[in-house]
Amino acid sequence: MSSAPTGAKVTLADVGLEPTSLDRSTDPCIDFYQFACGGWIQNNPIPDDRARWGRGSELDERTRVSLTALLDDDAHGAPRDPAATQLGAFYASCLDEAAVERAGTAALAPLLARTQGVKDSKTWLAALVELHKLGISAVWSTGVEADPHNARSNVTFLDAAGLGLPDRDYYDRPAFKDKLAGYRAHVGRMLGLVTSGATPAQLDAAAADVVAIEAALANLGKTAVERRDVQAMDNPSDPRALARQVASVDWPAYFRALGAPASKKLIVGTPRLFAGLDELRARFAPAAWASYFTAQLLDGLSYALPRAFADEAFALRRLLTGVERERERGKRCVELTAGALGELLGQQYVAAYFPGSARQAADQLVDALVHAMSEDLAALDWMTEPTRRFALGKLGKLVRMVGFPERWRTYDFEIRRDDFIGNVVRSLAFATHRQLTKAGKPVDRGEWQLNAFTVDAYYEPSANHTALPAGMLQPPFFGPDRSVAANLGGIGMVIGHELTHAFDDQGAQFDADGELKNWWQPADLAQFAERGRCVADQYSTFEALPKRFVQGPLTLGEDIADLGGVKLAFRAYRALRKSAATSYVADGFTEDQQFFIALGQAWCGRERTDETLRRLTTDPHAPAKFRIYGALRNLNEFADAFRCAPGTPMRPARACTVW
């Protein structure tokens, strides 16, 4: 910044930015994340009950306060309507910890009889079905998704699952040896809570059986990187072929017991698991399977059980993430009620906290980002016209959903104020059955995958739609009183990120109708792949922990979306400010610089070492610091805005660009 900028003088606070979050002692061309967030990081330690803390976490907490006010009124106020009655009863049942303690595990007795009673093939399947009815994916998962080759129809999707640890790497990598040992001890303690008279040696042996089964399942599964290969996850089958492949499972009986017939066509995500399932079942004795199924049940429902179970589940979470203290029960009850009755609570949230003007303003920003992407696609110098036409056509058909659903979901299951575990079991059974019975039916392309109050956004390739919930439309991402530069640096990057997902390494394999189909010219596809390799290779050099690096192939889709999102948001901001009569200089920062400061400040955060290690293994997103560092060092407009010299970290000799 060699010369003083000119324009109307204002403060950072005037435009919606935070001067106290900056670290002005850091050169933005050396470490922009520290420059934008150093003050925030210094002043915001990670709360004891969190594994990570960032601007999104602050927004989550702010939203939780709003939801708590709504639920307190539902639970303790005068009955207003059936939705409030349902919400109030579920929330009140969760808050009544004394009733949960009195109830004990009596409500689980029928389920425990199934899991602990495995003696043969028939009882093995009966136990598995009871877990799958509750969405507890022991051994494998059964779900329903859009057919990759006919996105208008839903098909049954089977895949590897059934692990108690976050990823298959935890079972055989030296870096996780202590986690595996701690997990085995956890399983033994958890089983001890429902196994009267068992000796410590017997419980340890049972836990060893559980770990051995899970390690075998992990060995038959896929790595996190392998799971990102959409072509390799697309393995069509049918019920008869599945029965020939896995003779030890009575598949007709399985689907009948689920109460949800499979579609005529099946998709198998991990064929290796099902090819090895007969041998795997025979390798372990019925008693070992009984221990495994019981452990899966208890870990899956620990949050609804007496405190001894919840405390043991927290001990495992502390081991895996480094979190120091369990969250208050009231906060957990808000989250659990939101999880069970999300769209009922979403309706109340929108009515109370989301004005129509916010939706209109967000719609306008989305339009600006779509226009910027259209211009970007039209001007790409590496794409030929046939591919460009398909890309523009896909963007033109992309459905943008903002704020909340047009149709709200209903919840048809019994809720009692004195039966929390029963409410949880019934809610899980309802949600699972609702999902499984979609098999063979038309896809609802307008269905939301997130609740209206959720602080997140997404793009769905099979529906070619993007959704931006109301919960995301708050500072530091968006605000009606923030400047265009601040809003586009915050929520604009998020919108651009989701739009770019339509053209990341996975999204680009789906056409405008959401079907897995190659619409690329060969030369363009080769260029696209080469540009993606540049990104993956670059991110793989980012050292997040000593000798622990970002997995570029794992984070590639999110990294492409970050690079594209920043570029599109910047272009949209420039377009919206092009005809402005006055430019604003905020505490010495130009509008371009304000845009990038807004971007950085939206992603300030910290996390515990164990949590970083877990996320480096499982999370398709790079750590927040490297999301900002990676996206901006590849953007000339950033280097120009801060006058970064060639060769500095934020203006490297070789930059990567895809879109």
Image (cartoon, grey):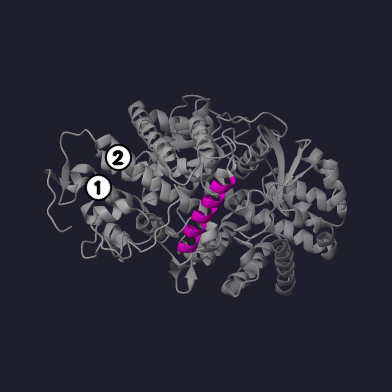
Q: What is the secondary structure assignment of the residue under circle 2?
A: helix
Foreground of the two, 218 or 314: 218
Q: Which x, y percent locates residue 152? A: 65, 30
Residue at x-position 30% and y-position 58%: 37
Residue at x-position 32% and y-position 49%: 599
Q: Which x, y percent locates residue 170? A: 61, 67
Classify residue 223 as left or right of residue 282.
left
Classify residue 314 as left or right of residue 274.
left
Mark 2 highlights which residue? 573
Kind of residue indicated by mark 1: Asp
Few, some or many C-alpha atoms within 10 Å of disc 1 (few <14, some 14-19, many ≥20)? many
Earlier in the chain: of badge 2 and badge 1, it is 2
Tag 2 and tag 1, C-beta contact below 8 Å: no
Foreground of the two, 524 or 564: 524
Q: Main secondary structure of the magenta part?
A: helix
Classify residue 203 as left or right of residue 467.
right
Q: Which residues are magenta?
A: 522-538
Q: Which mark is residue 592?
A: 1
Residue 139: image quadrant is bottom right
Kind of residue indicated by mark 2: Tyr
Foreground of the two, 250 or 647: 647
Q: What is the secondary structure assignment of the residue under circle 1?
A: helix
- The CA distance from mark 2 to mark 1 is 9 Å
Asked if the stretch drawn in magenta spans residue 524, the answer is yes
The quadrant of the image that shows the N terminus is bottom left
Q: Which x, y percent locates residue 99? A: 57, 46
Q: Would you say residue 342 is visible in this rendering?
A: no
Q: Would you say residue 517 is visible in this rendering?
A: yes
Residue at x-position 49% and y-position 63%: 537
